[in-house]
Amino acid sequence: MSSKNALNNLSRRRFLRNSVIAATGVVLLPSAFTSCKTDDDDNTVYEGQGFKEGVASFDPSQDKVILWTRYTPATQEQGKPQIILDVAKDKDFKNLVVSQTVEVDVNSDYTVHVDVSKLTSNTKYYYRFRSDTTQAVSVTGETKTLPAAGETSIVKMAVVSCANYQAGLFNVYGAVAESDADFVVHLGDYIYEYQAGGYGTNPSITTLNRAHKPAGEITKLADYRERYRQYRSDEQLQKAHQLKPFICVWDDHEVANDAYKDGAENHQANEGDFNTRKLSAIQVWHEYLPARVTDNAKIYRNFEIGSLVNLIMMDTRIIGRDKQLSYNDYLTPTGLNTGKFLTDWQNPARSILGQEQKGWLVSKINSSTSKWQVLGSQVLMGKMFIPAEQLILTAQIASGTTDPAVFAQYNKIATELATIKTRLLAGDPSLTTAEKARVQTVLPYNLDAWDGYPAEREMIYAAVPNKKLVSLAGDTHNAWYSILSDGNEKKAGTEFATSSVSSPGFEAIFGNNAATLAGFEQVNTLLIDDLQYVDASRRGYVMASFTATEAKSEWRYVNTIISKNTATVTGRTVIES
């Protein structure tokens, strides 16, 4: 099946999405709260039923929100389950706006999606799901609609990414649940596809019983569903979903590592047809992370929030991305074929968005009157250009080498380059041309990010002049603050990139030696011109706040992912005006 046909099939796949309209003076439907019997006919005692994956809300707008749950039928339950949704403005459900029967989608893993409309803007709502048949009742969820223009002076969003179940506890989700964020922006890698004992596993968490299920790498529809159910069994992730509305996009691990529109690094021929796998993965994503879209293959969408923020959620991973370049393809016996690489790298036809999404993005930014244009991008948009002579060594280290000679050589060169760059910034007239070239001859480190598609990035910057751009990014498992600059070194915006929920960062490569990590951070902020801050070892999230005058980022970190502890510390605060 071709990539185009696969995505067309996905677009035509219609989930059972209930639509209900909020009202006032709603009468509470029969329920466990008004009836003592389990079944009027035979008094059956039901077993095994429940809303075991919790509740969640998604894609809030000024007057709508999608409410979600998954229902496990009782062993004795016959036929299609009938579920009642209650929505109220109070946690006691006395001021009801919805009490209505909604349908379970038995063809979508027994999930329930309800798009509730005619809500009041900037208002908190409480909701629950219940079965009058089996007496099962979900936990009470909380959600909030977005403010209309003039209804708020600040918008606060918690930005998260990269949650690997078998890498450690989800304390970051617990911290987000306890925060004062209005909503959560999830930039992808909500699940990981790897097998039990694969990527992310480390000896310190073996007692936590968090090995992936199913045990093998997930490639089929049933596999992805079981993996999502495992992730949604996590207490702290359930709490975050229970208390905060989420706005989500996928990244690569929801399908397979380093995915693009026609394939992925972690998909081999013996694992079947890639497009069939992608179709299954994206279907399950929509089952568990519903988005308000008309085409399931196109998850890019925007949210206008209180005239302050135009939040633009993009798909830089699946819909339009051309295959990533690899330096390995340009290596020769004498080194890197720089000329060939530069020609391919700067090719203006290469895209990370696809033409349709790029046109949509430019149109949405230019037509918005909001103060801040906030881009939810899976991967880093800021330039991470490092001295060329560091490139191969850095790649070797990132690939997991343990060769002491490689680390020694890296440290030697990094020290030399840092010394030269310090002298250059100080205006040292004694620097030679050769020395300057060592720090000024730079190449992109991460070709999987926007750095691998520089021509399209320049097109975006040029098409939206005089806009206040803020990029939110995930993917790397580390925290970054960068200036977004165009090819003429003119500032185009700012990037607040979050660390991971649990996936390991550079500490997995360099170890937990504080001095080593600090040195790595200092060298990189010195040598990478646009990089202002990096944290290479801690797990956490970004609290991004926007007012009429400033955009603020707080990089918040948990102390551990080995034992349950949601306390956070703020590692850095940045304010842009």
Image (cartoon, grey):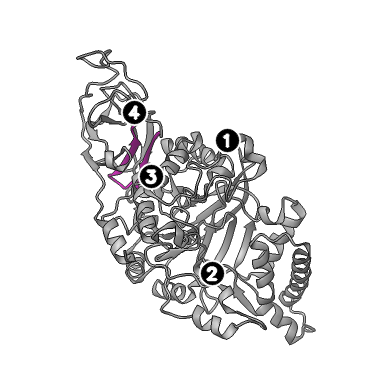
| Disc 1 + disc 3, Cβ < 8 Å | no
**Mark 4 or 2, nearer chain start:** 4
- Say above or below: 291 vs 23: below
Residue ID for mark 1: 209
- Say above or below: 121 vs 399: above
Mark pair 1, 4: CA separation? 38 Å
Q: Nearer the viewer, mark 1 or mark 3?
A: 3
Q: In this view of the protein, which residue sits in the foreground, 92 or 283?
A: 283
Residue 398, given in percent of the width and then of the height, sits at 64, 62
**Mark 3 or 4, nearer chain start:** 4
Q: Does the image show residue 392?
A: yes
Residue ID for mark 2: 447
Q: Which of marks 3 and 4 is in front?
A: 3
Q: Image quadrant of residue 101?
A: top left
**Magenta stretch bounds:** 54-71
Look at 45% across and 70% down and name the residue there: 323
Residue 475, given in percent of the width and then of the height, sits at 52, 57
Which residue type does callout 3 highlight?
A: Ala
Which type of secondary structure does the marked residue at label 2 adopt?
Answer: loop
Residue 245, given in percent of the width and then of the height, sits at 39, 42
**Mark 2 or 3, nearer chain start:** 3
Residue ID for mark 4: 90
Q: Residues within 10 Å of mark 3 (few under 14, many from 20)?
A: some
Look at 24% across and 43% down and name the residue there: 16
Look at 27% across and 44% down and name the residue there: 63
Q: Which of marks 1 and 4 is in front?
A: 1
Mark pair 2, 3: CA separation? 32 Å
Q: How crowded is mark 1: few (under 14 residues within 10 Å), some or many (20 or more)?
A: few
Q: Image quadrant of residue 3?
A: bottom left
